[in-house]
Amino acid sequence: MFRNALCALLAAFCASAPAMAREYAYSDAHLHYVDFFQESQGMEKLLEAMDHGRIEHVMLSGIPVAKKWHENEPKRPRYYAGDDAPVYWYSATDVLVAAAMEELEPAQRKRFHPFLSGFNPNDKNADAHIRRMLELNPGLWQGIGEVFTRHDDVTALTEGDTPRANNEALARVYHLAAEFDLPVMLHSNITSKRERNPLYLAELEEPLRNHPHTRFIWAHAGTSMELHRHQEKLEFLLPVVERLLDEYPNLFIDLSWTMLEPYLLDRQGRPDPQWVALVERHPDRFMLGSDVVGHFENLAEGLAAFDPFLDALSEKTAQQVARDNFLAILPRSASSEPQLSQH
């Protein structure tokens, strides 16, 4: 009798006690090792930030363009939009990523998943260049991207033609990605600053339809801070993402910082129930990204900011989104030790 009373008392206590806060382990599915000047705080700082934030794995990419310090500018710009000088395609960004990987001990190397980005997506030689890079460092590269196509002011500043996600040069890259089992991260804005409709959606949807064997990660679902400055919230985004996920099993969504507000969370920090429901419907198709560029002091806080949204998901789905989905999209051979060139 005493035992039954004790069990009843414990049950009542547990029912009245607040739920234990979840603690997540993360994968960062969108991280740039360098900034737009191809500079970085380095691997030591990155590892410190990862350990501080319980970030077990990161996608490691360069940035495919470099900002020019124009002869007529007296002060070096601090960001790509700092002045009117152009940006230009910069293949050496991948050399910097490969060199950073060489600094790591084998145990740490397993936490990093390099993506190859240093090519011009308007050039039909791009797939040949990527093939050479894969042959130069067998087993190193685990994905392609972030590929810059429609990208706010980067598009306007880029020397040469505006890249599109559905051009012929990138079609060749997508075929190569399928051949080598590499996911492709695409930055393709869904619209322009002024149009309140999915103006550029066809540029993304065509490769999804024509390359069913290629896995695509859509960087922050086509949103950007520049779009939000002009339009605040894109009301058409949720139904578009919902339809695309239903129709294209090769599409995955990177929920990096521009998705946090006003989509996943409202201005009071409350999870949006429609986005919660969509993620629960497709629990293996979403992943988190910080989208930091070469500086890592805010890395841990950037991923932890998603915790209120993760807490609104079932525990299993939350862990998939926080950590597991990114690892699942990598090549099947990603667990093997990469062979780095010695030179």
Image (tube, helix red, strand yellow):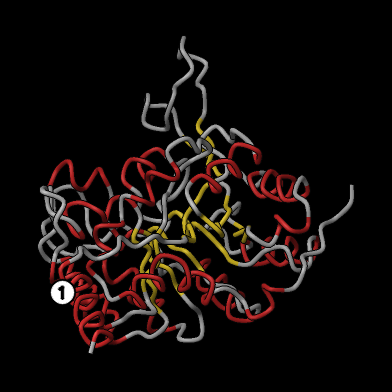
Residue found 26% across the figure and 68% down from its top: 201
Residue found 35% across the figure and 84% down from its top: 248
Closer-to-camera residue (287/305):
305
Q: What residue type is labelled 1?
A: Pro
Q: What count of labels does the image hold?
A: 1
Within 10 Å of disc 1 (Cα), the crowding (few <14, some 14-19, many 20+) is few
Closer-to-camera residue (86/19):
19
The vertical placement of 333 against 235, above or below, is below
Residue 26 x %, y %: 46, 60
* The furthest residue to the right: 343
* The furthest residue to the top: 74
Residue that badge 1 annotates: 239
Q: In which quarter of the image is the N terminus?
A: bottom left
User: What is the quadrant of residue 203 in the picture?
Assistant: bottom left
The vertical placement of 48 against 235, above or below, is above
Judged left or right of residue 6, residue 89 is right
Secondary structure of residue under mark 1: helix
Residue found 46% across the figure and 82% down from its top: 211
Residue found 48% across the figure and 72% down from its top: 324
Closer-to-camera residue (92/10):
10
The vertical placement of 333 against 194, above or below, is below
Residue 51 x %, y %: 56, 48
Residue 330 in view in this figure: yes
Residue 327 x %, y %: 54, 71
Judged left or right of residue 193, residue 98 is right
Residue 31 x %, y %: 50, 51
Residue 64 in view in this figure: no
